[in-house]
Image: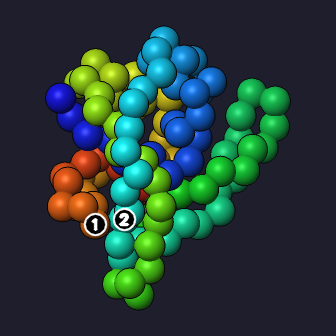
Amino acid sequence: MEKLFSYGTLRSKQIQMQVFNKVLTGTPDQLLGYKLKSLQIEEEFGMADYVVVVPSENPSEVIHGVVFNVTNADLAKVDLFESNAYKRVKVTLKSGISAWIYMEN
């Protein structure tokens, strides 16, 4: 199993059903040394507002989110779901867990 840290859209059960065809189980965790930045993405019906992780100059800055257990097939589905504004990278969370996140490309 892989670990996926979500700080936004993927925490929604409705989005999880859309992307994975199942609801994920997860545990709260934190990502240190990063911050959230507003991002506008052009979608089918116009512009939509999202957030994206970017490195912070402040190592004590925190992003709260959830760590999910996912398969490699699940990660492939998220790769398709996330736009090319995001890239998947491995990080170490406050708990010490190594997890994938989607951050600014």
At a point 59% along the width and 66% down the height, the residue shown is: 37
The quadrant in which the C terminus is found is: bottom left
Q: Looking at the image, can residue 82 be seen?
A: yes
Report x, y in % for residue 31: 36, 65
Compared with 95, 76 (above or below) is above
Q: CA distance from mark 2 to mark 1?
A: 6 Å
Residue reaching furthest to the bottom: 58
- Of the pair 31 and 83, the residue shown nearer to us: 31
Q: Residue at 52% of width from left, 37% of height from top? A: 10
Of 46 and 63, the residue lying toward us = 63
Colour convention: rainbow
Identify the residue at image location x=60%, y=56%: 51
User: Are the residues at dot 2 and dot 1 in contact (C-beta closer than 8 Å)?
Assistant: yes
Residue placed under numbered mark 2 in the picture: 31
Q: Is residue 26 left or right of residue 52?
A: left
Which residue is denoted by mark 1 in the rendering? Answer: 94
Disc 2 crowd rating (10 Å Cα; few below 14, some 14-19, many 20+) is many
Horizontal arrangement in the rendering, residue 47 relative to residue 9 (left or right):
right
Circle 1 packing at 10 Å, graded few (<14), some (14-19), many (20+), is few
